[in-house]
Amino acid sequence: MVEEINKVGVVGLGTMGAGIVEVFARAGFTVTGVEIDDAALERGRTHLEKSLAKAVAKGKLTEDEQRAILGRVTFTTSRDDLADAHLAVEAVPERLDIKRSVFADLDRILPPAAILATNTSSLSVTEIAALTSRPGKVIGLHFFNPAPVMRLVEIVTTVVTEPHVRETATQVVTRLGKTPVAVGDRAGFVANALLVPYLNHAVAVYEQGLATREQIDAAITSAAGFPMGPLTLMDLVGLDVLLDVMDVLWDEFRRPRYAAAPLLRRMVAAGLLGRKSGRGFYDYSGADNPAEPEPTAPLAQLVGDGPGQTSLADLLLVPHLNDAARMIGDGYATADDVDTAMRLGCGYPKGLAAMLDERGVKNVTETLAELAAAGLFTDDTAPLLTMLAKQGKDTLRS
């Protein structure tokens, strides 16, 4: 049993991994960052140095603090240099074959009492733990991008995670200045299981010709106060990343809500991945994004701001609230956990449970029924909402 975590290894120094290195080093941990070759290592080092330099330029760090943080970080291409680490965090690409190699090495190299953590956002922590001889000491530590800024860390336990490992991980996350949300191992955990189907739904609405991309994005930012619209956010995150998460959700839940929109799959196949490829729903190559013509699909007349029309914002938002109610009703997360995850992990101004309570159970269930009757919603109402409505209760926290 590790009494105290002081020495940390981070394997994988892409944007997320380098950010995790920064988070630990800022909090006073001694950190060893590991990459596969010298070129990748240098990219990770540069990312860390630029991030800290930006913080100094903004007056958020002094130059002495910057030097101290950098002094706590060692870079290497040898995983064997983690032989005295108390905790290792894996942040390599979301492919089980790559993680299999990493965890086999970490299991062999680190002391028997050391904790192994994965930053996976979509793969099963249980499957990853099974790759080691210490499954009880494997845990998920899901940071959000950018890691130095986002305050949420989902702590993901499996059915065999040892209690002291969860407790130690919680203490570490708190020491980092982050807010932990503890959940079990389930596809998407809390934040991604709620965020990604909502984004996918926006793609379906766009694909059906119910609204233009600008209308979809503006509806959400103006009505719900989200930091950006769903299609803009998808371009930022990467459509390939989101498709991978949708496929994992579908494999686990097999509900209509978790079926990837055909357009999403076609765009990924065409290499239209968003900002990183230069084009997604919008063009980032420097070319103008011409305004799209008004939609003319038959169902488009049902969506808009006119009399008898369904609000585009409600069409996108209410099924999102229904997802949250389903998760809470399943007992996977509390209303408070859902709200914390969405505010701190996704930048929402308020949580989904809070939004649902503001609208009221009656309003949400009636809206879902209207959407279903119009062919605009193909899932069913969360059992929790149905039960509360029958009981005459209008909030989740009744």
Image (spheres, rainbow, N blue to C red):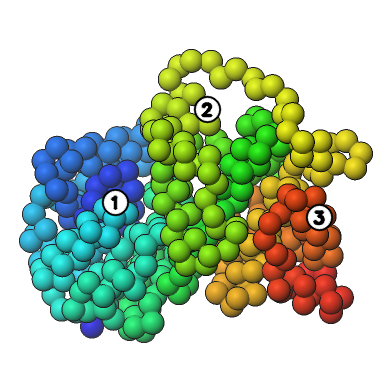
Q: Are marks 3 and 2 in contact (CB under 8 Å)?
A: no
Crowdedness of circle 1 by 10 Å Cα count: few (<14), some, many (20+)? few
Residue at the image point whose x is 10% and y is 49% from the top: 77
Q: Is residue 304 above or below residue 252?
A: above
Q: Residue furthest top?
A: 287
**Cα–Cα gap, marks 1 and 3:** 42 Å
Which residue does the image show at 42% across and 72% down from the upper left? 185
Residue 244, x across and y down, in percent: 41, 51
Q: Nearer the viewer, mark 1 or mark 3?
A: 3
Q: Position of residue 354 (x, y in %)?
A: 70, 61
Q: Which mark identifies residue 93?
A: 1
Q: Which mark is residue 282?
A: 2
Residue 148 falls left or right of residue 152:
left
396 or 82, which lies in front? 396
The residue tagged with tag 2: helix, strand or loop? loop
| Residue, disc 3 | 373
Kind of residue indicated by mark 1: Pro
Amino acid carrying label 3: it is Ala
Quadrant in which residue 337 is drawn: bottom right
- What residue type is disc 2 on? Tyr
